[in-house]
């Protein structure tokens, strides 16, 4: 990357989900930023391919190939129930054999598998979700993002919020996504820029709920409570602990590929032993 200067501009990738609005609303008016949107599962490849300097990537993609490096204490997380990462099942969760998964987020798919391993001792068969279908042949469906609220599936007797499930298992927050870049990239003042945008966005949550939520299909009051009471946007020590524990458990469970190789990528993603930079 080019030498850092005060006037440096950044290309950034983000998600268009309502939960990310407090992180990106201020960036939309930032002349130094070119912001592009995609589903979470695409963003890590944008970073690796050089399409953007950094992106709001799913946590499991930090330890992809090649690994990425977190560059900010701004994040998408929940310290308990999240509302928008949920599994719907027709039978009690411990009896499902097949789970149709929303591939928009790699992290949520791995989290669902880990919850089934930890609680029920087995992995259900997973298959890509047919979003155009009625889900009639699925034991269970994993959905993420706005569609959990705006396209809520019918005919399922049971629900599991994966943020709440993780908290019950560990007592820790769950981090879904962080701003990340290539490990050889020059972060410049990007960390400060992203943290400042987060702080400015949190101040605007009432406005975001009133203006942006209806456009995304959300009732205003549910959106306000969601953004205020359910979502966390700052990586504290507890969030870092939860993120590190999730990755260790996923590696141990073989959910991130070959455990030895996954450990190598974790070491590359967090070379100083810190889960993310301060």
Image (tube, grey):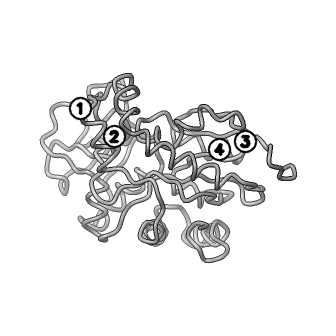
The secondary element bearing badge 4 is classed as helix
233 relative position to 117: left or right: right
Dots 2, 3 in contact, CB < 8 A: no
Question: Dots 4 and 1: beta carbons under 8 Å?
Answer: no
* Marks 1 and 2, how far apart at CA: 9 Å
- Mark 2 burial class by Cα count in 10 Å: few <14, some 14-19, many 20+: many
Q: Which mark is residue 269?
A: none
Mark nearer the N terminus (1 vs 2): 2
Camera-nearest residue between 157 and 222: 222
Q: Quadrant of residue 238?
A: bottom left
**Residue that lies at the very extreme toward the right in this rendered image:** 3
Rounded to the nearest angstrom, the CA distance separating label 1 from label 3 is: 39 Å
In 3D space, how far apart are the residues under numbered discs 4 and 2 (Cα atoms)?
22 Å
Task: Return the x and y of residue 29 as percentages of the image width and height.
Answer: 61, 31
N-terminal of the two: label 4 or label 3?
Answer: 3
| Image disc number at residue 153 | 1
Answer whether labels 1 and 2 touch (C-beta < 8 Å).
Answer: yes
Secondary structure of the residue carrying numbered label 2: strand
Query: Could you tell me which residue is drawn at 73 percent across and 43 percent down?
Result: 49
Residue marked by disc 3: 10
Q: Identify the mark at residue 143; answer none if there is no mark.
A: 2
Secondary element type, mark 3: strand
Q: Work out which quarter of the rendered image holds the C terminus and state it.
A: bottom right
Lower sequence index among marks 4 and 1: 4
Instruction: Identify the residue position indicated by label 4 in the image.
Output: 45
């Amino acid at each position: 990357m080019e030498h850092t200067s005060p006037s440096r501009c950044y290309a950034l990738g983000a998600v268009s989900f309502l939960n990310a609005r407090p992180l990106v609303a201020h960036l939309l008016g930032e002349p130094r930023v070119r912001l592009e949107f995609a589903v979470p599962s695409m963003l890590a490849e944008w970073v690796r391919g050089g399409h953007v300097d950094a992106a709001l990537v799913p946590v499991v993609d930090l330890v992809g190939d090649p690994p990425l490096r977190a560059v900010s204490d701004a994040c998408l997380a929940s310290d308990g129930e999240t509302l928008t990462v949920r599994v719907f099942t027709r039978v009690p969760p411990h009896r499902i054999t097949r789970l149709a998964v929303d591939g928009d987020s790699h992290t949520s798919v791995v989290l669902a598998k880990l919850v089934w391993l930890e609680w029920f001792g087995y992995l259900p068969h997973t298959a890509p979700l047919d979003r155009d279908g009625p889900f009639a042949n699925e034991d269970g469906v994993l959905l993420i993002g706005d569609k959990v609220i705006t396209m809520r599936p019918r005919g399922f007797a049971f629900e599991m919020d994966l943020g709440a499930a993780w908290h019950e298992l560990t007592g820790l927050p769950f981090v879904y996504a962080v701003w990340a870049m290539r490990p050889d990239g020059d972060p410049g003042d990007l960390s400060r820029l992203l943290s400042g945008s987060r702080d400015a966005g949190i101040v605007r949550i009432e406005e975001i709920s009133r203006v942006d939520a209806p456009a995304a299909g959300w009732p205003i009051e549910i959106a306000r409570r969601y953004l205020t009471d359910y979502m966390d946007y700052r990586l504290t020590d507890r969030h870092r602990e939860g993120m590190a524990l999730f990755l260790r458990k996923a590696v141990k469970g073989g959910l991130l590929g070959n455990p030895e190789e996954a450990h190598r990528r974790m070491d590359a993603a967090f070379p100083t032993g810190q889960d993310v930079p301060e």
